[in-house]
Image (cartoon, helix red, strand yellow):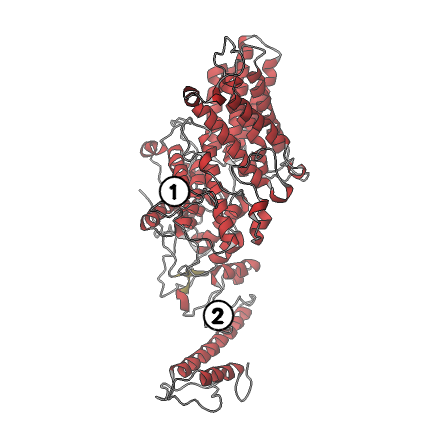
Amino acid sequence: DAKRPACSTCVRSHAHAVSHAPAGVEVPAVPECSYDEIPEASSSSSDGPKSRYERLENRINELEALLRQKDQAEALGNGGPPPASFFPAPGPGHHYRHMGFADYSFAAQAYPTPDAVGYQTHIPSPFEARIDSVSPTGFGASSTNSPATGSGSDGLVWSSWSPKLPKPELVRHLVDAFFSFHPNASRLFHAPTFMSALSLPPGHAKFPNPAILHAICALASLYTAAVTSPPRLNPEEPPDELFRRRHKPKQGRVDTFADTQADFARDSCDEQWSMGENLFEVLQARVILTYFYLAHARWSEVYLAASTIMRISVACGLNCCAPFHTIANSTRPLSLLPRAETTVEDETRRNTFWLAYCAERLHGCGNGWALCLDDMDVTQLLPVRGDQFIQGSLVATQHRQWAHSKDLFHNHPDDHTDSFTLYVKAVMLLSRVKNFNLRFRTRQFSGDPATMPTKPSDPRHPDDPRTTAAFMEIDDFISSFRASFPRHLNNPIDGDGTVDWHLYTACLVPHVASILLHEPHADLEHGGCASSCRILEASRAILDLVYALTSTSYDISLLDNFSTFAWFLAGRILVRFLEAAQLANGRDQIPTLVNEITYIRVAIAKMGERVPLAYRYGKMLNDFLVQKCGEAHAPPVSALAPRWPIAPVPTPVTSYYEAAEGGMHFDSIACGRMGMPPSQSYPHNP
């Protein structure tokens, strides 16, 4: 601060040295300020370690100030704004602080001029920071430049940055897309904490786990044109193929950017789990991988990934909460994780469990296989509201609902319910339906009174499950769930066209649950069949939600992947009714049913322009329609616009989706179209 005869820093340092001087060490009576003085090469043998340390710290402060002045002068001389300081003066008790890459990138983006974006410094930096290329045309790979040279390009790359990760600029872009367009992102992570951690040096203990970053890069590829995403479907490949990778060698397709990042994430998770390290971060990364596999209809990988996240959740003790623990003595701890230190950490763990639970349950709706965790073993609190989570508010246990609360499906306290809470409850309702269908015969065989018919059996349906107490209980849950939504959560689409992703799914679920529960018992040839009426009513209720959604400007590809399954299920039911109408020569019903089916096909096709899972469901529905009703009632749906990115790329990068679908890697295509030599540094999987 240039005070004379001694600056404030030297005064504080002298006072500290006097009070902490080792025995036998003489401390000068007054501060010896080294301001604007070049220290001698060697210090006196009588100087104690504290004194020498203070001298070095003072000198560092001086050099930092000179560097800041030099940087600002150069920036102004080039016509650009003063850059954010890379080396701010240390505060009391701190010897070094560093803003990190994110702060620099934000500063550059705030001034979109060539000079500002291209600003660079050639300074040796602590924390192994260096200046390297993160230019727009460098997306997709780590730098090929030597850490020692910097090669005169622009931007900042840490020399400790993982070579398997994309460059920091692209990682930040993909992370931004992930948090902007995937609603579960802000529940799986505490966004302010995560974004702050992303600004730290890669070697910092709180820097995001590499497995998480790889998984985010893979999933976020759906939302941007900066990287390549896997193709939707090869014409020779069945749309319901379980083991897609066995077709890959015949197709001659190389891994895209998203494929490679997903593989890196999986390998990193496997390695860390085998070492017993970062178990919770491994769980979070695997949840994201489950979303990735599902979005790309990689069914076998989805099944394994969803099963794995449930088993990890159990081992981490996230499926239960005190006091609902086992009463048995165990040689193993109830949880492999240490106790959460903060409210945010505790609620993040709880949210992660519920997201894992929802992913596994929603995937399970499409198959007849057993689930990985019994609902009786889920004794966890429901998540807090989103605003409470962001603020880190502590919500007392006595004011919250449990997963095993008896009034779960018809009581939704306003103070503790938001759309995500209803989303979780809706998935739990689907789980009840799935388990009922899966276990009914076993329960009846074992003599469970709830599965014994309470009314005389219909001759056409002996031992009709619909007359059992268990069936009627679940049917009542379905009916009361949607009707009991709080008034402020009654409509997933606001007046301005904004769509609440979680609430939209929660509104779909009761109709899907009705179809799953009643379709096995529906007799479409019998006009008085109650189950037939229920599934037709549910299908048209789903269609109404499709109408409401497509009447807005909302990008439907941002919906939960379960929405596509719900639309497909409704379309399939309508196809069954169309077939029945054809057989009964019901000419009045046929045009209406064809129009309804076509509208659902168009909506699924529109979503399929971005999401491969939707594309496959569209193909499956079309095949089912042709099989049941003939090609005459399966007119081609209108051609839709190409799949463009929804995340604006802050660089001159254009869309490369078609190149990806043709099997060409982003690096060579991008560089070729931009007149650049392709990078050789990005690891391509064979």
Nearest the eye: 567 or 456: 456
Q: Residue at x 59, y 32 (%)?
A: 507
Q: Using the rendered image of the protein, determine whether residue 269 is visible from the camera's viewpoint.
A: yes
- Placement of the N terminus among the 4 image quadrants: bottom right
Nearest the eye: 402 or 123: 402
Q: Secondary structure at mark 1?
A: loop
Percent of width and height locating residue 538: 58, 24
Q: Residue at x 40, y 44 (%)?
A: 257
Q: Amino acid at mark 1?
A: Ala
Percent of width and height locating residue 552: 63, 35
Residue tagged by mark 1? 328
Nearest the eye: 247 or 483: 483
> How crowded is the residue under tag 2: few (<14 C-alpha within 10 Å), some, or many (20+)?
some
Judge from the rendering whether residue 322 lies leftward or rightward of residue 679; answer left or right: right
- Placement of the C terminus among the 4 image quadrants: top left
> How crowded is the residue under tag 1: few (<14 C-alpha within 10 Å), some, or many (20+)?
few
Is residue 444 shown above or below 404? above
Mark 1 or mark 2: whose residue is earlier in sequence: 2
Is residue 556 shown above or below 103? above
Task: Kindly report the distance in space between the C-alpha atoms of the residues bearing marks 1 and 2.
Answer: 56 Å
Q: Residue at x 60, y 25 (%)?
A: 541
Residue tagged by mark 2? 87
Q: Secondary structure at mark 2?
A: loop
